[in-house]
Image (cartoon, rainbow, N blue to C red):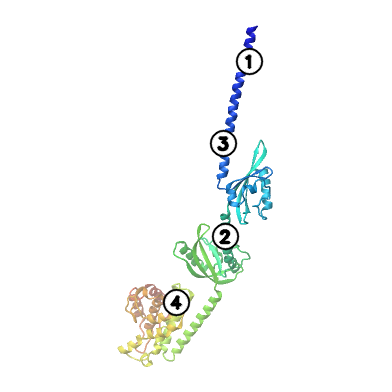
Amino acid sequence: MEDKTKQQLIEQIESLHKELANLKQEEAKRKQAEEALLESEKFSSSLLSNSPNPILVTNRDTSVRYVNPALEELTGFSPSELVGMKPPYPWWTEETLQKTSEDFREALRKGIQKAERLFQKKDGQRFWVEVSATPAKQNGELKYYIVAWVDITERKRAEEELQESQELLQTLFDSILDGILILDYSGEILSHNSILGKMIGLESTGEAVGRNALEFVLPEFHSVVIQDLANVKEGRGGYLNSYKVRSATEREFWIEGLGTDIIYKGKHADLVSIRDITERRRAQEQLERSFAYLAETVSRAMSSRDPYTTDHQQRVAELARLVGEKMGLDKHRLEGLHIGALLHDIGKISIPGSILNKPGKLTEEEWALIRAHTKQGYEILDGGRFPWPVADMALHHHERLNGSGYPDGISGDKLGLECRILSVCDVVEAMSSHRPYRPARSREEILEELKSGRETKYDASVVDIVLQIIESGEFELN
């Protein structure tokens, strides 16, 4: 019996030892956990204190529990002023008061919330922050909020400046007196201002976007537009050109387009300034008609003194216009060529009639006077401010490609196209007409002169066209 009691006591003692050991282990674990928690709290406190961004911790009733140094530095409010304070917080502005209050409720209901808010410092200075509110929960119960700020004042200021710049540019874009459009290099309209829309008969800004500009350009000008776009795309510089267009209301009018390459939405595009030049073209055409009328009047006036020269100039003008048309010269340039031909011998007005109408062979002195008519003509026409090289045509219509002509002996590319056309037409008409000092040349002599002088004295392309005109009978030799 004693042995049994003794054994039970031993077992109880061993059980107590085990419980004691377990208690010591649990105590050690508890101390270890407390130390870990303390270390974690110290670490968290260090993170909060050293964070470069402002951080605010509030209790579940949204009273301030903690503010870190960065928040104090940004706002100017000290922890002693803020801890325990409930909303509205002193950094809230009237503009954001209601919305910021809603942020807390949304954070509680949905979790982490971010918002951009306009706050104010203790001194009243305004600043922008991005606010992130995170509810901290334990066992499903809200304990506190952690609210982090990021100062975005500079970013917002940059955004506002950019917005102001964009609004200013858009205002300029829409209010400039010229039409403005941006094209890709296929001709598609990417953007345009309201003036351009009105110009082409559209009711609203942007209505033409997505359409091809060629829809509004008359077909005979399509190749010009395509070439202008190609030149800019391939880096050959901008352009200034005139086109005739048709609006959405079927009104046809002239425009002048000034185009250049730009970067639009990250891609190369053609920025074109469009100006309606219909009235200018009308005035220009009226002026050109006046010049033409004046030239014909002057040419006819010369007939009372020298009918040979008058008839010669008119026939040269007729042949020159035929050549210019076949060479594809535009209407403006053709008009200048015609007027220049009508006046190319105007310098002969200064030569005595006794020499111009002298029968028989002329002396060297008399030939020198006749040759001087080119310079005399230049001096007469140079001050006329013609919109074409009329004075130059009078001066150089006796020059030759190989430099054998007069008065300056210039050659090759130094001779303008109009002068090269006139030199051939002048020779053809002069050889085919009777003069007091010599008879007209035969058709065969004229053709031989052109063929033998082709590419040496005369422009080959002009000679070929003149031969074609003579062969077809479009111009009859006297």
Query: To which residue does mark 4 refer?
Result: 322
Of the residues shown, which amino acid type is indicated by label 2?
Glu
Query: Dot 1, crowdedness within 10 Å: few (<14), some or many (≥20)?
Result: few
Q: CA distance from mark 1 to mark 4?
A: 136 Å
Choose between 462 and 277: the one closer to the eye. Answer: 277
Query: To which residue does mark 3 refer?
Result: 39
Q: Are marks 1 and 2 in contact (CB under 8 Å)?
A: no
Q: CA distance from mark 1 to mark 3?
A: 40 Å
Q: CA distance from mark 4 to mark 2?
A: 62 Å
Residue 302 is situated, as x and y percent measured from the top left of the image, at 44, 89
Question: Is 168 left, or right, of 304 in this rendering?
Answer: right
Outermost residue to the left: 364
Q: Is residue 326 above or below residue 213?
A: below
Q: CA distance from mark 2 to mark 3?
A: 47 Å
Kindly state the secondary structure of the residue where label 2 is placed: helix
Q: Which mark is residue 161?
A: 2
Q: Which mark is residue 12?
A: 1
Choose between 305 and 228: the one closer to the eye. Answer: 228
